[in-house]
Amino acid sequence: MSRRCELTGKGPMVGNNVSHANNKTKRRFLPNLNDVTLQSETLGRGVKLRISTHALRSVDHRGGLDKFLAKADDAVLSPNALKVKKEIAKAQATA
């Protein structure tokens, strides 16, 4: 399982641990990922995703999963999130 947010594409970054003696050793900064079930109003069901806490706040700010995915760039979405985005678009087109 990759350490990448399914909605924003946020992944690990690299940097240095710096000691008091100014010794530098490599380290990784991992994103704060959580397994969540977000409710889709259009589909009428929950969608399980592994997203960062920053993405969770962004989904709430934009007014839900449906509105977030409508504005999201396809290049950063995971294949699972892209599939959900297309299902939502199809359901909205038929309604």
Image (cartoon, rainbow, N blue to C red):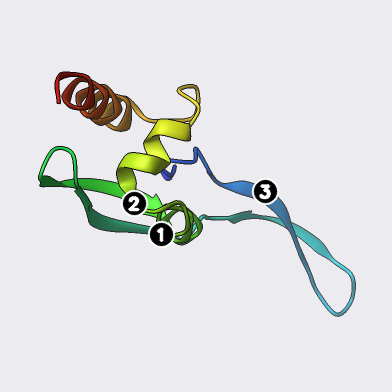
Frontmost residue, 14 versus 36 = 36
Residue 1 seen by the camera = no
Which residue lies under the disc numbered 1? 60
Q: Quadrant of the N terminus?
A: top left
Which residue lies under the disc numbered 2? 64
Quarter of the image where one finds residue 95: top left
Q: Amino acid at mark 2?
A: Gly
Quarter of the image where one finds residue 84: top left
- What's the residue at 20%, 20% (across, down)? 90
- What's the residue at 32%, 46% (across, down)? 65
Which residue lies under the disc numbered 3? 14
- Disc marking residue 77: none
Upstream in sequence: badge 3 or badge 2: 3
Q: Is residue 78 above or below residue 94?
A: below
Q: Amino acid at mark 3?
A: Val
Q: Amino acid at mark 1?
A: Asp
Upstream in sequence: badge 3 or badge 1: 3
Residue 36 in the image: state x and y as whole percent. Answer: 25, 57
Kind of element beneath mark 1: helix
- Mark nearest the camera among 3 and 1 is 1
